[in-house]
Image (tube, rainbow, N blue to C red):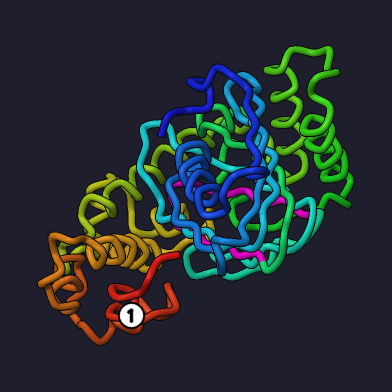
Amino acid sequence: MATPASRAMDHSWSSTGMPREAAFLRWRDWASSMIASMDIKVPDPTRFAAEQQTIMLGPVALLTVRATEQQIIHRGEKASDPMFQLLFSRSKHFQTRVADRDFTLKQGEFVLLDNTRSYEMRTQDAHAAIDLVMPQSWLERWIPEPWTAVAQPFPTTGSWGAPLGKLLTAMADEIGSATLPRAMLADQVGALLALAVGQRPAGSGSHRSRVRRRILAIIEDGYADPQLDIDQVAREAGISRRYLQSLLAEAGMTFVGCLNGVRLDRASQLLLDSARTGYRTSEIAWMCGFRDPDYFARMFRKRFGLSPTQWRTRTLA
């Protein structure tokens, strides 16, 4: 995915006047190219409506979105400079699942999302949100350990959350009247975000971040090996087992959760691969590092809400 800095122009779009199903397809393509690769489902494409505005703020992109009910499924993606999102709900609730954690993002709350990790969000009604898409290299200037703040709803009623929410809203609604350079406005957001989540720059932050990325990269490269275990990953990363566990715990993760998450995400892709329609689900499980097909099936249903067979045969909206 290209970084926001590579997109030189502001732009906006509305489904008004478009055939509804064509509008939905265009919306899905825009979201995947601008935010993160994702599947979007809606209960009835013929009743879909949406609008968006993209505002470039130097290295980050500020997106304002309004849309009817939808479900968003993001599988996680590798990148040399991973992207994060700061999602602020202006109206309605977002039912959210990140890895094996479920929570509700309520109106007036914001949450930090890591685009290298899978997540799912669902809205029951028409909704409005502001989404700040940020390169990790920029975000770490303000939050050296962004993983510690991922998937935790923060209110905009707190001492620092309130000015952050007001600044995001003002930029979304009145960017044309701003007298400061846009990159400076982005820095204001970064500073307020660090205060709101309770982080400040620390000398060890970037090192611990790099080690954690190394751990996740080893898991992503070796997930198909059914014998991959925490001790092997720790050896390859050049750290102790205990230090590996503490680094993942800081980001709200466990080794087994990370490994199963990567394996299940890959299995979900292979099950929909037309080149593998003749493979049994047990063979897909083995290809993704699961030795026990029954365990694979249980974990798959827990993560995606469907059995592997149902997932393969489901009809996408």
User: Crowding at label 1, few (<14), some or many (≥20) Cα neighbours within 10 Å?
Assistant: few
Q: Quadrant of the N terminus?
A: top left
Give 202 or 195, whichever is nearer the viewer. 195
Of the residues shown, which amino acid type is indicated by label 1? Gln
Which of the 4 quarters of the picture holds residue 288?
bottom left
Residue sitting farthest toward the left: 278
Q: Quadrant of the C terminus?
A: bottom left
Give 242 or 123, whichever is nearer the viewer. 123
Q: Relative to 173, does residue 20 appear above or below in the rendering?
A: below
Q: Is residue 34 visible?
A: yes
Per the picture, the main secondary structure of the magenta-coloured stretch is: strand
Q: Describe residue 258's horizontal placement relative to residue 115 as left or right.
A: left
Residue at 48% across / 59% down in the picture?
73
The stretch in magenta equals 109-123
Give 310 or 13, whichever is nearer the viewer. 13
- Look at the image and say whether residue 121 sits in the magenta stretch: yes
Q: Relative to 46, does residue 32 appear above or below in the rendering?
A: above
**Image spot of residue 302 (x, y percent):** 43, 79
Q: Which residue is mark 1?
A: 310
- Look at the image and say whether residue 147 sits in the magenta stretch: no
Which of the 4 quarters of the picture holds residue 254?
bottom left
Give 99 or 107, whichever is nearer the viewer. 107
Residue at 58% across / 32% down in the picture?
139
Secondary structure of the residue carrying tag 1 is helix
**Image spot of residue 89 (x, y percent):** 74, 52
**Image spot of residue 186 (x, y percent):** 70, 25
